Image (cartoon, rainbow, N blue to C red):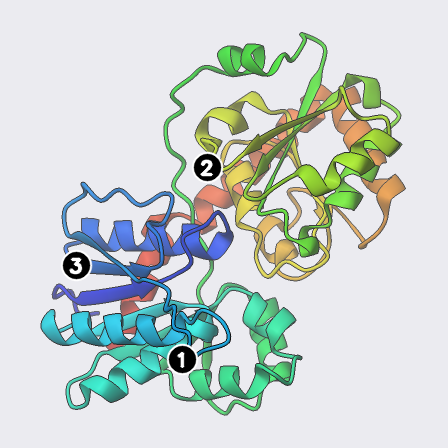
Amino acid sequence: MESRPLQIGITCFPLIGGSGILATALGTELAVRGHEVHFFSYAKPIRLDLSAPRIHFHQVSVGQNSVFPCPDYTLPLAVKMAEVGRSEKLNIFHVHYAVPHATAAFLATEMIGEGAPKIVTTLHGTDTTLLGPNPQYRAAIEHALVHSDAVTTVSQSLRQQTYETFELRKEIQVVPNFFTPPTPARSREEVRRELGIGGGEFLVVHMSNLRPVKRIDLLLRVVASSGRRDRIKLLILAGGAFAPYQPLVHELGLQDRVIVRESAAAVEDYLPAADAGLYTSEAESFGLSILETMFYAKPVVAFRIGGIPEVVSDTAYLHEFGAIEKMAASLDALIDSPDAARELGERGRARAEENFTAARIVPRYEAVYFSI
């Protein structure tokens, strides 16, 4: 594989969510490896360190014009990508999500013309599972993928779904997500004291953007169904507003069982303080939060859907979607058997360290870049 430094443009959403977090981590690792990395988004990605060498951020203003019935992002994004792509002589546009990012990248390359950057599109799930079946978006996504120089997905499951959803004759490569666990700033005991966790209580963590697909309703019902619910505290590290779920918290009588930390919570502080991770998505192409939980040796309970089995293999309790009582029973088993819970968590960490580190995954993205 070639090793010369590249000029890479990364376009992603800046919020808490697997795609933005992965894109930010990837750009950071690429910069460490000597590449110049330019980020494009409407706001600074939450985990992006702008003081790091070879990292650049180009903020895109959302278009506001009385001619249009609503604000526009795709065209201003395309213009900014073309401007920087031309001035910085970028080699690659690596976009996370087909619409609007790959669409903007295609427009940018058309504006640049000869010598334009090659386009790598990474699908994280939404393009295929949510937008793909929608006739308002399908043709645009298909066009963006056809005109990408390389397409990757984060799991075999998503790769197969993408082939089933779109008319594509090109090869889709699977490059999984990765995670590099930061060093905690606070001790487990300090964080548990801050959260008000008693000595005999079992802290269950859930991390997500709280979108409907994450099924927070089922998350709460699993805890409510636990035979050990009086020992459980559920910590939700939320990338969105939790207020819509408060009525269900009250309905289930979980007011004193649920703790919410909104916005950019430091997962490296909270995960070591937890005892297990609980995830109830109805669709999950990979499950980056699950991987983060595994890296801190916490046992995982989740539904067997999408790419989750590819991530955890046999190191987690997986159940068919909707099996609330079985999920609750798995939580109870972890509470009742601390040694078994610890052993399951350690197996999860060993799998994560063997398969999903930056050292293993980033060179695979570099290989994609150099191949085109």
Label 1 amino acid? Answer: Thr
User: Pointers 3 and 1 in contact (CB under 8 A)?
Assistant: no
Dot 2: element: loop
Please identify the quarter of the rendering in which residue 197 is found: top right
Circle 3: element type? loop
Instruction: Quadrant for the C terminus, please.
Output: bottom left
When the figure is inspected, residue 3 is found, relative to residue 50, above or below; the finding is below
Query: x, y (%) of residue 278?
Result: 69, 38
Residue with the mark numbered 1: 103
Mark carried by residue 216: none
Near mark 3 (Cα within 10 A), the count class, few <14, some 14-19 or many ≥20, is many
Mark 1 burial class by Cα count in 10 Å: few <14, some 14-19, many 20+: many
Residue farthest to the front, as pictured:
66
Q: Quadrant of residue 304?
A: bottom right
- Tell me: residue 158, above or below residue 332: below
Query: Dot 3 corresponds to which residue?
Result: 35
